[in-house]
Amino acid sequence: MNTTNEKFERSLKTDMFNFDPAKKGSIYWVPVRHHSPQCSRQLAQVFRKFKPDVVLIEGPSEATSFISDLQSKQTKPPVALYLHVVDKKNLWEAEDNKTRYRCYIPFDEMSPEWNALELAAKSKIPAKFIDLPYQSQLSINLHRSRFSDKEDQLLYDDEALSEKIIIKNLISSSHCRDFDEWWDRHFETGTSYNSPEPFFYNMHQFCQLVRDDEINNQDPLCLAREKYMALKIKRHIDKGKKCLVVTGGYHGIGINYYLKSWGRDNSLDEKKFEEFPGMNSLESKIYIIPYSRQRLNSTIGYSAGMPDFGYYSELWKRIKNKKQTPENMQEFHSQLASNVFASLSKNKFTATIPDSIESVALSNRLANLRNVTAGRTEFKDSIETAFVKSSYDHDAFQKIVKNILQGDAKGQVASGLLIAPIIEDFRKACQAFRLPRNPSDRLEKNLDIYKSTRHQQVSHFFHQLEFLEIPYAWFNSGPQFSLQKDLKRVREIWDVQWSVETEVRLIEQSYLGESVQEAALHLLLMKMDSKDSLGRIIHGKDKVPLLVKALSMGMHDIISPILQLLDHWIDQETEAIYLCEGFNHLAVVYRARAALSADNLSGVQEVLKNCFERICARLPWFNSTSEEQVEVICTSIINMYQLVSIDTPWCSKGAFCDSLIQVNNDIPTPKLNGLCTGILYDLQRLNIDNVKQRFYIAFGQAALNASHLGEFLWGFLLVAKGRFISDNRLQEMLTEIIEQCDEEEFIVFLPALRMAFTSLSPRELRSLTKALILHSDCENPETVNFSAPINWNQQDLELSLRLRQELSKQLAHWGIDS
């Protein structure tokens, strides 16, 4: 053992476990694993023996004033302290451009910290949080960014501990799959402790092994926290208080070291912890919020949690009722197996009582084979073996059992607590719009966003909540401006339902602002300035959808700066594909300006004009054959064509046509060529002979690529199908081309030709059919009844069958089902 560990061992024996319950100014150390039922059980025994004067708990000290609310009988775990800090003066902006930070400190009924609070309340003694204030932790810039980047940031996260070499060695030498299995065997359920002393002594020894470095060779935030907690404890010792200290086991040794070093270590200056850089620029708020057991599972990313929280929750209920010991795990597993059986049966999964009995017996046999007490791992292995009869059942079984073992309980907070301003704003909006504010069935809300100003306001409110990911309003159908879908619809339909989770999520987003609109606005600004995984600012084309989103949310005050950013990006952008992606979103804004209340936004037209001109200049340089990029370019050209065709004053028809002529001459992409030909013909920049020439060129290319003619026709019909239906010269031209094909060539060309005509509606197809018959050699074509059923003779039916069989072979070549 190295010198440091020898020092730790002496510290354990002489300092941390040499206490006199009757002595004033003494400490009883309770090192814990967060949310461990066994730690809570041993803590309760210590409390009765030691009879402390004060309970000191690892937790940010500024939250001490909320302890009475946590101890309220109305507060039911799981709950969490939610802390957020706003850097009002952007003190740290130059370093990481983050101005808002938040974190969670969760508690469940089996958490040692929660039980310490309950025991203190029952004994009517004070309980206090003693950890470094959250604001101070943020001042240590090494860790500041992680408090703003993660979606569900927990203040105490043990991810770094799992990477310790000693942990990996313990797991490997014990033949365990992971640390949680090792923990179960040695602390949670696999070892019997008749008194708390050996349990916490072993905990200290384990933590000593984990802290295998010198005290000062640690993470700066960890050291600052331990020094601060030592200071808080020292102040109570100096007053002669018997202190019960409940902290994560990792920190106990460090805190004790600093307590013994007080007066000898110059770094232990109390003033350093009373003030820190930037305190006056920070605004901090704390709320108690309901939490869920699902979030507390280490299996979903909370490394300080326990795996399969539902399993340990059921175990804790038995411990609390004094029914559970390591010797009667079989009884516990029998109860749990019955719960699994009931849930499987309820979900129509084939399960029997003998399967349930067999799972318990199997867990015991597995434990004997492994020479351990049956625990969580053995239970999970055995129920899967007993209940799952085939691979077909496996996924359904895993889903059901996962829900059972994770637990689905949600907490409740006491009434009369401080309400976040964002909650008050939400409730006022619901009242004004006559929307549900209490649990109710899901209702459908229809909004006429083109005619009703009130409906537009409700739509803005729903879009803000959706943007903030608040579970309250779900978009069902209607125009989706940001996705450029269903733009012909004039109504939005939303599903609306209030739940506890609605206000929980609102509180969690309160770090963004004090109202729903302010929070959505700040999130929008964050997204505008966000970076990709490589640290690069998001591309300008990806900011255009945010403009559409801002308008959907009714945030017209911020549109001008967004437009300025987009205008600058357009001036700098050289890639036609990116300009086209941006233009497609801007065109949606222009066409739907009434619904988006953007009629008076002249800046939109200026940006559109700039983007239109840049595309005209850059489009001839487009040289990609990517199907996805060609689709984007085609959509953009159609949007530009629609603006030109209605004589939009800021869209130059001449520049647009010149650009398309150059594209048609230089870019050998059939869809794009067909589209440009159709537009130029419709705008009278090409005559019928020019169009014929281009069709024959496409026909010639079809010898090399069977789909070339069909794709050219597809692009042509996108914009010129009206002319194709009404102009018999175009029909005759296509007929001439087809007649030049022999039967084999026609069969090869046919799939792509069929695909091209799918752009025609049923009504347009009937009009085209009528036009073809009227210009055919049919006798008395005007007497043909297009709606009458056709009477096929046997010979025609047989010919049709053979043709279909041949078509099927050709279509199969292209991967198309006939």
Image: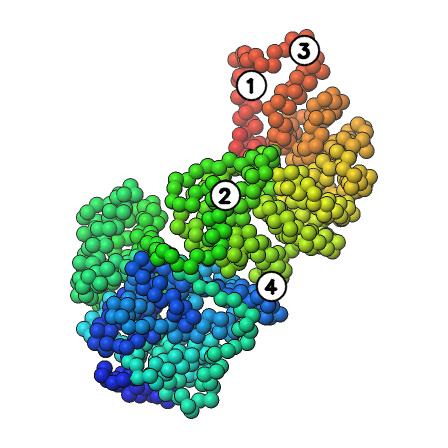
Which of the pair 164/119 is nearer the observer? 119
Between marks 4 and 1, how big is the CA–CA gap? 64 Å
Q: Image check: 712 left or right of 338? A: right
Q: Earlier in the sequence, mark 4 or mark 1?
A: 4
Q: Image check: 173 left or right of 507? A: left
Q: Nearer the viewer, mark 2 or mark 3?
A: 2
Q: Earlier in the sequence, mark 3 or mark 1?
A: 3
The furthest residue to the bottom:
264
Which of the pair 779/397 is nearer the observer? 397
Query: Residue 173 at x, y = what percent?
Result: 32, 73
Task: Using the image, tell me which numbered label, if any, was put on residue 781.
Answer: 3
The secondary structure type at the circle numbered 2 is helix
Between marks 3 and 1, how big is the CA–CA gap? 24 Å
Task: Using the image, tell me which numbered label, if any, was put on residue 799.
Answer: 1
Q: Residue at (42%, 54%) from the top-left corner?
A: 504
From where the camera sits, is residue 219 visible?
Answer: no
According to the picture, the residue beneath numbered tag 4 turns out to be: 535
Q: Nearer the viewer, mark 4 or mark 2?
A: 2
Mark 2 residue type: Ala
According to the picture, the residue beneath numbered tag 2 turns out to be: 432
